[in-house]
Image (cartoon, helix red, strand yellow):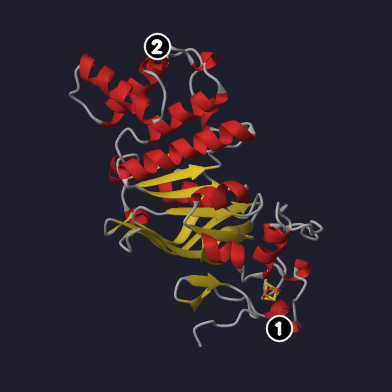
Amino acid sequence: MSQDIALQVNNLRVSYKTGGQEVKAVDDVSFKLYAGERLGIVGESGSGKTTLALALMRLHKPPASIEGGEALLDGRDLLALDREEMRSTRWSKLSLIPQGSMNSLNPVIKIKHQMADAIEAHERGWTKSEISKRIWHLLGRVGLPESVAEMYPHELSGGMKQRVCIALAIILEPSVIIADEPTSALDVVVQRVVMQTLNDVQAQLNAAMIIIGHDMGLMAQSADRLAVMYAGKMVEVSPIGSFFKDPQHPYSKLLISSLPSPEEKRELAGIPGSQPSLLELPSGCAFHPRCPVAVDHCKQVIPELRDISGDRRAACHLVEDQAS
Ligand code: SF4
């Protein structure tokens, strides 16, 4: 994995304004995505993962609005592009496989027409036979036979539909792919196949990929690094091996201790309480009411996400700087 940066997000803030109140759905989030890497983003529902993905694509809808920050891709700030510049950047440089994407396929239009429409929406001048060849090539890339082009979505299994959605996302060979819950609503075996397809496609394109999800097992299998979100903030970012071996943030530790382990017989801990409402965040560290090691200081001061060693970051007052 190279250390060239494919996407750099600095201090991104996204809010929902409802009934005169402002909810900070993504609160001062900064991270780097390296060229060719797979960054997993995990967190409970409502932690800001999907809002982050939609904001990076500039596909968020009111009442969500971007309040600040920047997202640098190829030296340009995505958040400062005008509508036309963003339209031409989307899918060619940065593409999204949205949550529930397989249900967005039109059930009464053949796959080849849906794919041809997507190609023609971005690039003109292709002949019919060139488009057909390109569709077959894309289907092949995601492990589907050419005959799928002639089928309707209802004739495909969930896994096949999801692979069509992956093919649609890579039509213009983007350098960054964001996959939001790419395996949700699929059974466990199919999840593995779809995830493997996504990983293969990402490697073939040498694209960088953000994988958003809940399933820590799939993350362990696919991601190079993992970022954990809690109540709109990133609270830990670590290489995947170090994360599972030695999680730093108390929330990460609880996430891991709630996973079953085939080697070790131990009680599944679970995480006490539930994520707070973004409308009524606790003072200081938002995790303090659930944190087993919280101290008084945690109730008063919000911990910053800071470097704790060369390649690890955590937002917790009690995490030692491992470099010092
Ligand atoms: Fe727990 Fe305090 Fe660390 Fe927050 S800052 S995770 S409350 S120890």
Amino acid bearing label 1: His
Residue at the extreme front: 263
Query: Does 150 appear above or below 228?
Result: above
Q: Ligand 1 falls in which quarter?
A: bottom right
Could you give the CA–CA distance between mark 2 and mark 1, rounded to whole angstroms?
63 Å
Query: Quick one: 179 or 75, which is closer to the camera?
Result: 179
Residue 13 location in percent, x, y? Answer: 50, 61
Residue 188 location in percent, x, y? Answer: 63, 35
Query: Quick one: 192 or 66, which is closer to the camera?
Result: 192
Residue 87 location in percent, x, y? Answer: 32, 40
Where residue 269 sits, quadrant-wise, is: bottom right
Q: Does the Cβ of the disc 1 residue fall within 8 Å of ligand 1?
A: yes
Q: Does the Cβ of the disc 2 residue fall within 8 Å of ligand 1?
A: no
Amino acid bearing label 2: Glu
Tell me what residue is drawn at x 43 percent, y 42 percent: 199
Residue 250 left/right relative to 202? right
Residue 88 location in percent, x, y? Answer: 28, 41
Query: Does 18 appear above or below 174?
Result: below
Please report whichever mark, 2 or 1, sits nearer to the chain's N-terminal start.
2
State whether residue 15 appears in this view.
Answer: yes
Instruction: Using the image, tell me which numbered label, if any, was put on residue 113.
Output: none
Q: Which element carries disc 1, helix, strand or loop?
A: helix
Residue position marked by numbered label 1 in the rendering: 297
Residue position marked by numbered label 2 in the rendering: 150
